[in-house]
Amino acid sequence: MNEIETLIIKSLKELLSLKCITDENDVACGKLVFPIKRDKTKRISEQEARFLLVKQLEKQEQTKFQYSVESPTTKTYCFTGKGERSGNIDLCIYDKGERCNLIEFKAMNPKQSSYTKDFEKLFCDESNLVNYFIQILENTNNGTIPNIERKYRMAIETVREKQTVFQSSLKIFICDLGEKSIMKYEIDKNGLLSNIEIIYKTDKPKNT
C-alpha cells in the first residue's frame, strides 16, 4: 500500500465516525459534521470525503505531496455530445511538482453516465499514473454492490469504445457508512476489474 492509499484509508476511517449535526455529540467528536436537508434527514455527499482527505494532506507531518482542487484536465472530452471541452479533476496530487494521482469522489449510486465520465478522465487524462475513484454509500443491501459493479464494467467498456487505450490504472475505494466498512477494487490498464476486497470493517454500534 502506497502513501496516498494510506492517507485515503485514514480519511475514510474518519468519515465512518462522522456525526450528523442532529446527533448528540460535542466538539470532541469532531468539528466536521454531516448537515441536514429540508426534510431534516442527513445529507451525504462527496464533499465530506474530500475535506477529510485534504485534512490528511494538510497535516504537518505530511510534507511530500502538494494538491489542487477542481483541477482542469490536460485533454478535452465530449461528455454531452455537444463538442469537446476540458473537464475538472476533483483532487489532483503532486509529487515534486508533477501530477502523480488524480482522484474523483462520488456519493451514492448515480446513473451510468456519471461513472463513465469520471472513469474516462481517470483512465485517459494522464499516462502511467495510479488514479483513484472514491465512492461513498449511505446504506447497502444484497443488490447494491452487484449493481454498482455492473456499472463499473459498463463504464470500462464505454470508455474503451471511445478511447481504445487506457493510459493509467485505477483503484476504487467504496466507503459504506451503513456497514461501517471500506472496500476496494483495482482496474488495470487493460480494463480488467479485480474482485472486491474488504480492507476495513468495524462493528456497528448496538442499539440500546
Image (tube, helix red, strand yellow):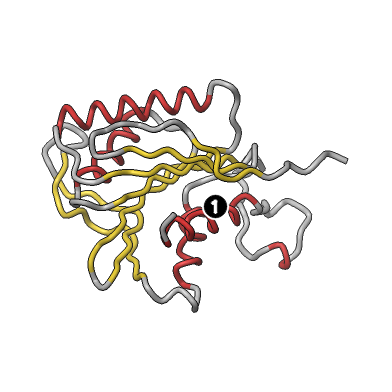
Q: Quadrant of residue 111?
A: top left
Q: Which residue is mark 1?
A: 12
Q: Quadrant of the N terminus?
A: bottom left
Coordinates of residue 109 in the picture (x, y in percent): 46, 32
Q: Quadrant of the C terminus?
A: top right
Number of numbered labels in the structure image: 1
- Residue at the top extreme of this rendering: 143
Coordinates of residue 26 in the picture (x, y in percent): 75, 64
Q: Quadrant of residue 148?
A: top left
- Residue at the right extreme of this rendering: 208
Q: Which residue is pictured at 76% across the width and 59% down the height? A: 25
Left or right relative to 203: residue 123: left
In the rendered image, the vertical position of residue 108 relative to residue 112, given as above or below: below
Coordinates of residue 106 in the picture (x, y in percent): 43, 43
Which three-letter amino acid code belongs to the residue tagged 1?
Leu
- Residue at the left extreme of this rendering: 83
Q: Nearer the viewer, residue 203 or 86?
A: 203
Q: Which residue is pictured at 46% across the width and 72% down the height? A: 58
The secondary structure type at the circle numbered 1 is helix
Left or right relative to 174: residue 88: left
Coordinates of residue 162 in the picture (x, y in percent): 15, 31
Q: Which residue is pictured at 47% across the width and 48% down the height? A: 46
Q: Residues within 10 Å of mark 1 (few under 14, many from 20)?
A: many
